[in-house]
Image (spheres, rainbow, N blue to C red):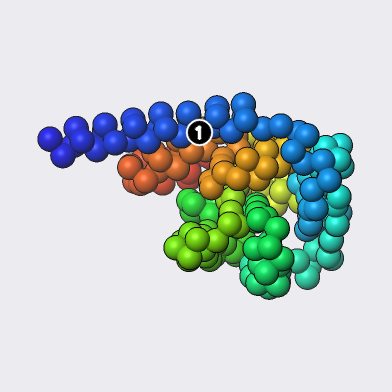
Amino acid sequence: MTHLLGKVLAVGAALAALAAFVTWRENFESGSLKGARVLVTGASTGIGEQMAYRYARFGAQIVITARREHILHRVNFLSYLQMTSRALPSLEESRGSIVVVSSLLGKMSSPFVGPYAATKFALSGFFGSLRHEMTMRGSNVTITMCFLGLIDTQSAMEKVKGYTNTKAHPASEAALHIIKAGATRQWDTFYPWHLYYMILTGNLHPFIWDFIIRSVYSN
């Protein structure tokens, strides 16, 4: 009976996620971003750069920031905390939103990416806790967590070179997905969408998933 109930709950969760995915895509209106004030971090390259282009096309007012890569690697987690704490008062006044770009590696462990995965797990823990606290006190600020697979940015492709042949997805489409999720004030979103089912499978059958993960990497 317990086993059957588990399967029913898993199917229900999957259907709910699929319904939510379709709904936010249909509800997004690009006009809603016209004149919106947006801060894009890491905007010199990769996903941040693509997001800046997309926001500009939608008519948003953009402030962009970027730092040297070796410094960014040291403040990859702490910078989120510092910027969030400073921005929260203004976000409360404007009913704003926080969009956090995370990774599948913030939900599931993989080999050869220990430091990077550690920062992404830390993001999930911090913003998950903050979201609970803000919801409990009736805050009008939403937090959207975006979990991405392998994206074809130069930085990402250099890091995985020689380790895996996993398909990389276009940064421009990832940027658009993130913008839509933030504009429709989603809680969690996944790009590509099937990452949700990968995570669900991994949670239900961790030993099988660990074997699959190791099989797509080479030493």
Answer above or below: position of 212 versus 114. Answer: above
Q: Residue at x 80, y 53 (%)?
A: 37
Q: Nearer the viewer, residue 139 or 72?
A: 139
Disc 1 designates what residue? Answer: 20
Note whether residue 112 is visible. no
Q: Is residue 52 left or right of residue 4?
A: right
Q: Is residue 154 left or right of residue 10?
A: right
Give the farthest residue toward the left. 1
Q: Amino acid at mark 1?
A: Ala
Position in image of residue 160 (x %, y %): 67, 48
Residue 102 lies, in percent from the top left, at 61, 52
Question: Along the line of sight, which residue is nearer the eye, 182 or 190?
Answer: 182
Closer to the camera in the image, 137 or 113: 137
Residue at 83% across, 65% down: 67
In terms of image quadrants, where is residue 42?
Answer: bottom right
Name the foreground residue: 154 vs 26: 26
Rendered image quadrant of residue 174: top right
Regarding residue 127, the answer to whether it shows in the image is yes
Q: Which of the 4 image quarters holds residue 204?
A: top left
Dot 1 crowding, Cα within 10 Å, few <14, some 14–19, many 20+:
some
How many marks are shown on the rendered structure?
1
Q: Name the side, left or right, on which 114 lies relative to 28.
A: left
Report the residue at 86% width, 50% height from top: 61
Q: Position of residue 144 (x, y in %)?
A: 59, 50
Identify the image quadrant of the N terminus: top left
Residue 125 is situated, as x and y percent measured from the top left of the image, at 49, 63
Dot 1 falls on a residue whose secondary structure is: helix
For this view, does 82 lie left or right of residue 202? right
Residue drawn at x 74%, y 38% as measured from the top left: 32
